[in-house]
């Protein structure tokens, strides 16, 4: 049995005293800010300490503007929609160099890290909506690849093991006008540097309806499915299709849709748990327990066995009420995966 790797998707709650506006102001300065870096590093290490084996840098920026604000800047582009390589920076990765170095010195090995970048289609839809300019889509794909390429060459104290292209609109957004071949070409272009570097390359889909597009992309080998909140998503995946294209899965085994989870508690206790937080902890102590999470992994494994390469929470945890609760969910996943491995 190939061991399934525990990773996470990215976003994480802000600590007490930090706001999204404060973070946005710091990011807009586009420099090595000590307070900003400390906030990122503390969150990143909470993931590591919770047992995440391939953690994603904490995503505290808008998934589109994080990249488009740089791509749109004429000083950072060599032509419209094509960012200069040296300006294609992911500040969060620069931040975690500090804690990664400390980890390497303490443990004698580098951390494996997952890098999540917004896919070219998602960036295109943000600026152009339901139009079809394939040349612009390809330029955006080249820009995404440059963010990845720059990150790969700049990383000193950690290994970039996984590069994930986040494309939530594929299979959901009716505005998508591109042909399948254009979408496949865009995905392949966006992760060509990651493929050349030997990384696992994932596409994170919020719906697996069109997962076969990813199977047809030469540079993608992992398909992410949010299957904890929607177990029926697994029924849409054909294991033979994965085998024929030599593709693997990243399965969601812990729910992250906290608003729906809180709604269950609101109904149970006839209260507003967001205001009266007495029962909020039940999400991680009684609902998303390690046993429940393990059962989901066992179900997915019974369907796809060695075609599963990664597992973890469905999506990011940025909407969760606190860092402690988010970290506890990650610990529950770690415990579930440890039990699963022990019994295989």
Image: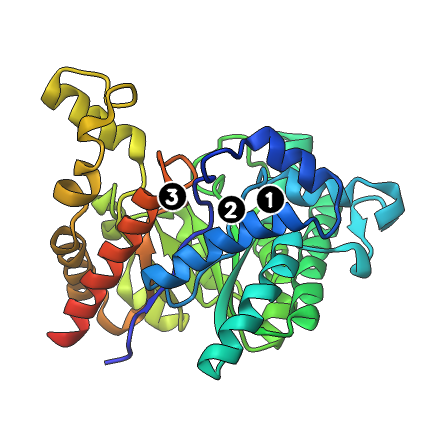
Question: Residue 280 placed where, x, y %?
Answer: 22, 32
Which of pointers 1 and 2 lies earlier in the amino acid sequence? 1
Residue 337 coordinates in the image, percent (x, y): 22, 65
Helix, strand or loop for disc 3: helix
Mark 2 vs mark 3: give the one in front: 3
Q: How far apart are marks 2 and 3 (CA)?
A: 26 Å
Residue 68 visible in the snapshot: yes
**Disc 1 versus disc 3: nearer the observer:** 3
Q: Name the residue under label 3.
A: 323
Label 3, residues with CA under 10 Å away: few <14, some 14-19, many ≥20: some
Residue in the image at 12% along x and 42% along y: 286
Q: In which quarter of the image is the C terminus?
A: bottom left
Q: Residue at x 75, y 49 (%)?
A: 31
Camera-nearest residue between 269 and 3: 269
| Image position of 308 (left or right of 340) | right
Is 271 above or below relative to 126?
A: above
Instruction: Tell whether 184 sits left or right of 292.
Output: right
Q: Which of marks 2 and 3 is nearer the N terminus?
A: 2
User: Are the residues tagged 1 and 2 within 8 Å (C-beta)?
Assistant: yes
Seen from the viewer's position, the closer of residues 175 and 198 is 198
**Which quadrant of the view contains residue 268?**
top left
User: Alpha-carbon distance for marks 1 and 2?
Assistant: 7 Å
Q: Which mark is residue 104?
A: none
Q: Name the residue under label 2.
A: 167
Q: Residue at x 61, y 54 (%)?
A: 92
Q: Quadrant of residue 326?
A: top left
Q: Do the residues labelled 2 and 3 touch (CB within 8 Å)?
A: no
> Quick check: marks 1 and 3 in contact, CB under 8 Å?
no
Q: What element carries label 1?
A: helix
Distance between mark 1 and mark 3 Cα atoms: 31 Å
Identify the residue position indicated by label 1 in the image. 121
């Amino acid at each position: 049995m190939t061991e399934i790797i525990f990773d996470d998707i990215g976003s994480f709650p802000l600590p007490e005293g930090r706001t999204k506006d404060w973070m946005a102001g710091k990011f807009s300065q586009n420099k090595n800010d000590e307070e900003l870096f400390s906030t990122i590093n503390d969150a990143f290490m909470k993931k590591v300490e919770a047992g995440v084996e391939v953690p994603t840098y904490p995503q505290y920026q808008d998934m589109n503007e994080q990249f488009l604000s740089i791509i749109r800047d004429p000083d950072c582009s060599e032509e419209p929609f094509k960012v200069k390589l040296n300006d294609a920076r992911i500040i969060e990765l620069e931040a975690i160099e500090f804690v990664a170095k400390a980890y390497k010195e303490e443990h004698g090995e580098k951390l494996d890290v997952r890098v999540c970048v917004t896919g070219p289609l998602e960036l295109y839809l943000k600026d152009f909506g339901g139009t079809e300019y394939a040349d612009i889509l390809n330029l955006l794909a080249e820009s995404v690849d440059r963010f990845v390429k720059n990150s790969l060459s700049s990383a000193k104290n950690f290994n970039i093991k996984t590069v994930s292209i986040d494309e939530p609109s594929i299979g959901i957004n009716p505005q998508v006008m591109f042909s399948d071949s254009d979408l496949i070409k865009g995905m392949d272009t966006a992760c060509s540097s990651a493929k050349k570097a030997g990384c696992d390359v994932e596409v994170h889909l919020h719906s697996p309806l069109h997962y076969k597009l990813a199977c047809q992309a030469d540079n993608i080998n992992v398909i992410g499915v949010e299957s904890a909140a929607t177990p029926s998503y697994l029924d849409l995946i054909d294991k033979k299709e994965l085998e024929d294209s030599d593709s693997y899965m990243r399965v969601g085994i812990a729910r992250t849709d906290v608003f729906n989870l809180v709604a269950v508690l609101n109904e149970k206790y006839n209260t507003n748990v967001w205001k009266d937080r007495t029962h909020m902890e039940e999400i991680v102590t009684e609902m998303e327990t390690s046993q429940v999470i393990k059962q989901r992994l066992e179900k997915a494994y019974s369907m796809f066995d060695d075609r599963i390469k990664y597992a973890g929470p469905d999506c990011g945890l940025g909407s969760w009420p606190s860092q402690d609760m988010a970290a506890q969910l990650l610990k529950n996943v770690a415990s579930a995966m440890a039990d699963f491995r022990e019994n295989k």
